[in-house]
Amino acid sequence: MKQADFVRLVMPFKDKVFRLAKRLLVSQEEAEDATQEILLKLWKNNKKIEEYKNVEAFSMTMTKNFCLDRLKSKQAQNLKIVHSNYQDHNVSLQKQVEAKDSVDWVSKIIEELPEQQKIILQLRDIEDYDYNEIASMLDMNETAVRVNLSRARKTIREKLTSTHSYGIK
């Protein structure tokens, strides 16, 4: 495969690879390193890439596996899941504090979810993959993906609601 073909094939979804890596790893730098490693692995195996029906799904699976391995490795003992993309400079300070607090709570709740639910939540709600694509990436059936996503969302909703109810029932 020529370099131009590789670039045409892989570059449209490199940002999705990065966002999944960032969801699973602690920092921008870790996610950038992971993305670079994935793209390098894809380039080294560019002859095999053409055999895959869905290169994007294959790449996302590679990213998930790479990041989970990285999290399990000894050098990653201090990593944790952190995610906050919320920035809006045109709102009052109180609204900013409330929004940041909500994002922090959601991040904390997501951090407590089982690993599979975290990944499915990222792929479906952030990356906007279809259920069948997620099922293919994670080697699950579609129903299991839907059930895990539903449970993750329900957990987030319940814990966030109880956090914000301030004891009022």
Image (spheres, rainbow, N blue to C red):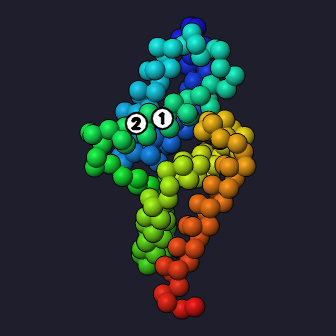
Q: Residue at x 51, y 30 (%)?
A: 62
Neighbours of disc 2 within 10 Å: few (<14), some (14-19), many (20+)? few
Q: Is residue 31 above or below residue 143?
A: above
Residue 34 in the image, given as x and y percentages of width and height: 40, 33
Disc number for residue 65: 1
Amino acid type of the residue that numbered disc 2 sits on in the rendered structure: Asp
Left or right: 3, with 125 as reference point: left
Residue 8 in the image, given as x and y percentages of width and height: 61, 20
Residue 136 in the image, given as x and y percentages of width and height: 66, 35
Q: Nearer the viewer, residue 78 or 16?
A: 78
Q: How many marks?
A: 2
Q: Is residue 76 above or below residue 63?
A: below
- Determine if residue 126 is in view: no
Q: Quadrant of residue 140?
A: top right
Left or right: 57, with 75 as reference point: right
Amino acid type of the residue that numbered disc 1 sits on in the rendered structure: Asn
Q: Is residue 54 above or below residue 47?
A: below
Q: Residue at x 43, y 78 (%)?
A: 94
Disc number for residue 142: none
**Residue placed under numbered mark 2 in the picture:** 69
**Circles 2, 1 touching at the beta carbon (< 8 Å):** yes
